Image (tube, rainbow, N blue to C red):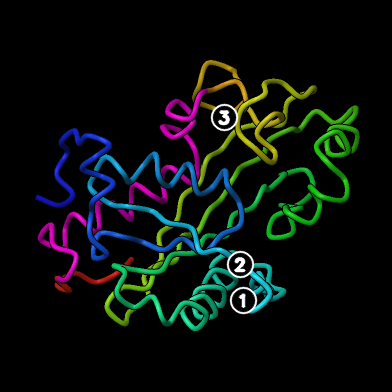
Amino acid sequence: MLFQDIKKSKGELDIMDEKTTILFVTSNSGKLNEAKLALNPFGLNIESFHFNEEFPEIEEIQSSELRHVAKDKLRKAVTIVKNSSNKLGVMVEDAGFFIEEFDGFPGVYSSYIHKTLGIEGIIKTLTGIKNRDACFKCVIGIHLDGEEFFFEGECKGRVSEIALGTNGFGYDPIFIPNEGNGRTFAEMNSKEKQKFSHRGKAIESLRAYLHERNQSPTSNQCSGS
């Protein structure tokens, strides 16, 4: 039965029908892989929507709230992939890296700052500063049966003094979660990171909600969070 905690062979996952497929509208392979890792074991197939000249990447609105960005992004995504209505759902995600000393900056601008300043630049800005507390936040938006649902996750920790580890992506080499024995996300394997990460927590909320829908991809008996 769908969403049961049972082991499935790769062959079984490969032949799942369209009604077990969630189309994840993202160009970030790291986010895609983490979603697959979390949801595939429960009978859900996660596919990436491929952007092209006809359907370029979604332009994000300027907002200080992740949820506002995720909501706008989801509505645009549903419009773009309207021909994929045979899927179980369409999903988007918005996440940010929030540094306490900088009043939460870069936050919703994390992707831009990572591209322009880089993680070494973040380390330099914190030189000599004792308060290195930070957190990752994530909002997942999913469109199911004509309705929108949102699921949030947060992971608190601190910024390391040097980049450590080669796994993960983004700010992972400089973020040490409060859980995880003092290692950065980049020093953990994917399954370890999933236990503590903001994305892992948001995905778990999504999985729990889907489970509550009577383990049926077509049931609509529960309200979203």
Identify the residue at image location x=73%, y=53%: 110
Please name which of the two marks, 1 or 3, marks the residue nearer to the observer.
Answer: 1
Q: Is residue 213 magenta?
A: yes
Q: Earlier in the sequence, mark 3 or mark 2?
A: 2
Mark-to-mark CA distance, 3 and 2:
33 Å
Residue 148: x and y in percent read: 37, 75
Q: Nearer the viewer, residue 219 or 18?
A: 18
Q: SS of the residue at dot 3? A: strand
- Could you tell me the amino acid type at mark 1? Phe
Dot 1: element: loop
Specify the quadrant of the image occupied by residue 82: bottom left
Measured from the top left, where is residue 25 in percent x and y?
A: 51, 64
Please give the count of numbered marks on the rendered protein: 3
In front of the other: 140 or 161: 140
Extreme top residue here?
A: 181
Question: Is 165 left, or right, of 117 in this rendering?
Answer: left
Task: Pick whichever, 102 or 82, lies toward us.
Answer: 82
Say whether marks 2 and 1 touch (CB < 8 Å). yes
Which secondary structure lies at badge 2?
loop
* Residue at which label 1 appears: 55
**Which one is closest to the eye, mark 3 or mark 2?**
2
Residue at left 39%, top 67%?
A: 142
Q: In screen coordinates, is 111 left or right of 210?
A: right
Segment tinted magenta in the rendering: 189-218
Residue 31 position (above or below residue 78): above
Q: Is residue 182 left or right of residue 13?
A: right
- Residue receiving disc 3: 177
Q: Which residue is mark 2?
A: 51
**Disc 1 to disc 3, C-alpha distance:** 36 Å
Q: Quadrant of the C terminus?
A: bottom left
